[in-house]
């Protein structure tokens, strides 16, 4: 493979990657790092972070060393670069001794443009000595939030990376992450000794993603409706909190005729690798997983990310939902959320290891996530404010609270009725009960349990007939979410908090969220504020696009790589629409650099001629 010889980032972008211009902050970042400067980059998933270190690595003398925790994906990352004509390799625990030796020899001979390393490799003295003997052009620290103890994905091995600056002080470093609050950003800079680095913060907005949070009511059936009505045949990720739920949900979807695979840390390692490989290489698969799955997944056509359980933090939610729509096409982030989620997360915090400060920090993360769920405002605007960005737009037109505006109501009296019921059970009867029983009392239902304990004799019996059962569930959920009521004990009974008495006395008005009857579903071709509809192919181009997809699938299978490594759908759409007559015209298509043109150009032209004949 011939080396890429150019110090001009713009030329590298065009020749290697097939793009005419950088996007957003990319050019400023690339020029700064290529010139030898350190950088801390915050850019959303799908925003083009990889180019920010790949282009400078090709422009600088020496090898760009990329530290990444994504061991299972390094082969695909390297395959994608090699398809572009970039000389890339990796060193991690999946290789045998011969593979490692060949990669090390290529590095020492100056025959690698990019070398990917797992962070734990830097604990091995032989790796450090190897780097000392070669010529390093830059260090790129991917998924840099892993260094933050208070972030959502802390990895102890990342703490070693502060030594890069000490041992190789003249080598520029670029740290990249898709999500970090200002506090996490400061921690990343301090732990990686990047306090003097230039910070680049791109917009966190992903306008092509439609954010939707729905009240949880038989969530698997709700998920099935989403997939059948909006995402039939689409690739997507479904996140569950427990391994058991992952397996049950994957089995449920499979039983409903949807191709679904499970993924969690308890599965056999070989099965995990196989399922991940299938998800990356096959079209239309649904991966049901714990959060152990997904970091660094470069699959561009994930059309939805669904959560059946509440994420622990806004950072985690943003990172996970960001795996949808990396190609910029309309995608869905869907979350089913209920009272049980709040109870479960609070219990996990109470039972977690760590001191009081640690638990307070976890509670703050959860409270921010609950605020996002309960907001009556635009969800996108609230997400951006959490990351310290103001969109300047009050309504995005592409989230559920914009599509079906949510009102608030004065819930002070309703809250007093709930709290009074809980108080009377505790102080008049020395009893505690859960949500269902409290609602039965409020609605005046003479259930066997109500009659058994003579709770129909309480003064609060039947005082809540003005609201329905789902409405009372919403009231109680919001009280628990705000810490105005708690759930405790083995039987999940409702109990007072320090804030409960003030609410019961009516000292502060309490505005609550009104649940919409049914949130409107956005059309997949919706062109609302900031969104971009999927490219509609003409009657002539559509069958050509399908022929190109079939060719790509066969080529990918033959090479053992994901289809997107060859060409993204967006590139195939442009080819099908423009129908270039020869290789020269094909080379003007976005996403086709010199390497891919040389490797696939004749095959693509043959497909086009076959479609035309």
Image (tube, helix red, strand yellow):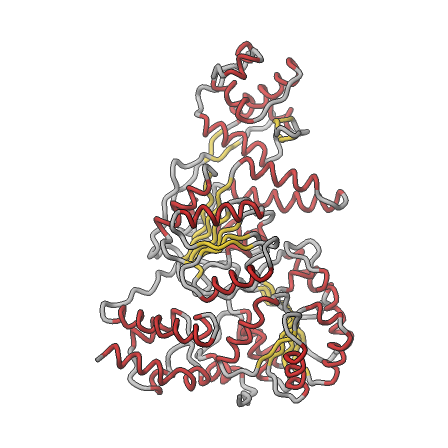
Tell which of 482 and 557 is nearer to you. Answer: 557
Residue shown at the point (51%, 30%) measured from the top left: 475
Q: Give percent across and percent down for residue 426.
A: 65, 18
Residue drawn 49% across and 58% down? 205
Left/right placement of residue 238 relative to residue 482 reads left
Is 410 or 290 nearer to us in this picture? 290
Displayed quadrant of residue 353:
top right
Is residue 527 positioned above or below 570 on the image? above
> Residue 360, located in which quarter of the rendered image?
top right
Q: Is residue 398 or residue 453 the one in the foreground?
A: 453
List x then y, in percent, for residue 122: 73, 71
Residue 259 rendering spot, x and y as whole percentages: 42, 55
Residue nearest the observer in this picture, 446 or 197 = 446
Question: Picture coordinates of residue 403 (x, y %)?
Answer: 38, 46
Direction top: furthest residue: 457
Residue found at x 38% / y 61%: 532
- 206 relative position to 52: left or right: left
The image shows a total of numbered marks equal to 0
Q: Can residue 39 be seen in this snapshot?
A: no
Q: Quadrant of the C terminus?
A: bottom left
Can residue 157 be seen from the camera position used here?
A: yes
Q: Is residue 522 above or below residue 75?
A: above
Q: Is residue 508 above or below residue 317?
A: above
């Amino acid at each position: 493979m011939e080396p890429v010889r150019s110090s001009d980032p713009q030329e590298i972008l065009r020749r290697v990657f097939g793009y005419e211009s950088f996007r957003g902050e990319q050019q400023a970042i690339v020029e700064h790092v290529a010139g030898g400067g350190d950088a801390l980059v915050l850019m959303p998933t799908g925003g083009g972070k990889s180019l920010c270190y790949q282009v400078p690595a090709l422009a600088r003398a020496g090898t760009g060393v990329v530290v990444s925790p994504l061991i299972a994906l390094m082969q695909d990352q390297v395959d994608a670069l090699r398809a572009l004509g970039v000389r890339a390799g990796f060193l991690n625990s999946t290789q045998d001794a011969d593979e490692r030796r060949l990669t090390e020899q290529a590095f020492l001979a100056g025959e690698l443009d990019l070398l990917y390393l797992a962070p734990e490799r830097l604990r091995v003295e032989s790796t450090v000595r190897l780097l000392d003997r070669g010529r390093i052009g830059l260090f790129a620290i991917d998924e840099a939030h892993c260094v933050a103890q208070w972030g959502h994905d802390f990895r102890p091995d990342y703490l070693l990376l502060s030594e890069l600056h000490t041992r190789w002080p003249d080598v520029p470093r670029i740290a990249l992450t898709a999500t970090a609050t200002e506090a996490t950003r400061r921690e990343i800079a301090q732990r990686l000794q990047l306090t003097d680095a230039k910070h680049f913060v791109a917009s966190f907005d992903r306008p092509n993603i439609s954010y939707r949070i729905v009240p949880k009511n038989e969530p698997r059936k709700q998920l099935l409706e989403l997939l059948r009505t909006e995402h039939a045949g689409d690739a997507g990720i479904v996140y569950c909190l427990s391994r058991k739920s992952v397996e049950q949900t994957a089995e449920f979807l499979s039983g409903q005729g949807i191709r679904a695979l499970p993924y969690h840390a308890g599965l056999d390692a070989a099965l995990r690798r196989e399922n991940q490989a299938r998800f990356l290489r096959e079209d239309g698969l649904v991966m049901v997983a714990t959060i152990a799955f997904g970091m660094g997944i470069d699959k561009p056509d994930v059309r939805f990310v669904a959560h059946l359980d509440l994420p622990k933090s806004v950072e985690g939610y943003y990172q996970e939902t960001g795996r949808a729509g990396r190609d910029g096409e309309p995608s869905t982030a869907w979350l089913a959320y209920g009272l049980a989620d709040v109870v479960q997360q609070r219990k996990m915090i109470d039972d977690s290891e760590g001191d009081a400060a640690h638990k307070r920090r976890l509670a703050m993360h959860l409270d921010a996530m609950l605020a996002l769920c309960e907001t009556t405002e635009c969800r996108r605007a609230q997400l951006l404010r959490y990351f310290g960005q103001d969109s300047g737009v009050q309504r995005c037109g592409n989230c559920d609270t914009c599509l079906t505006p949510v009102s608030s109501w004065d819930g002070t009296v309703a809250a007093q009725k709930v709290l009074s019921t809980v108080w009377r059970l505790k102080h008049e009867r020395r009893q505690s009960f859960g949500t269902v029983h409290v609602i039965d009392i409020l609605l005046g239902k003479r259930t066997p349990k109500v009659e058994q304990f003579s709770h129909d004799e309480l003064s609060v019996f039947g005082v809540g007939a003005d609201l329905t059962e789902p409405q009372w569930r919403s009231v109680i959920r919001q009280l628990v979410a705000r810490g105005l009521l708690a759930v405790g004990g083995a039987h999940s009974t409702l109990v007072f908090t320090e804030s409960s008495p003030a609410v019961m006395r009516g000292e502060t008005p309490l505005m609550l969220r009104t649940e919409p009857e049914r949130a409107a579903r956005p059309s997949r071709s919706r062109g609302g504020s900031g969104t971009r509809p999927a490219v509609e192919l003409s009657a002539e181009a559509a069958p050509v696009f399908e022929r190109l997809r079939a060719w790509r699938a066969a080529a990918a299978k033959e090479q053992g790589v994901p289809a997107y490594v060859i060409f993204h759908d967006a590139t195939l759409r442009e080819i099908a629409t423009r129908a270039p007559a020869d290789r020269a015209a094909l080379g003007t298509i976005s996403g086709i650099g010199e390497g891919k043109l040389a490797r696939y150009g004749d095959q693509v032209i043959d497909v086009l001629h076959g479609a035309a004949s």
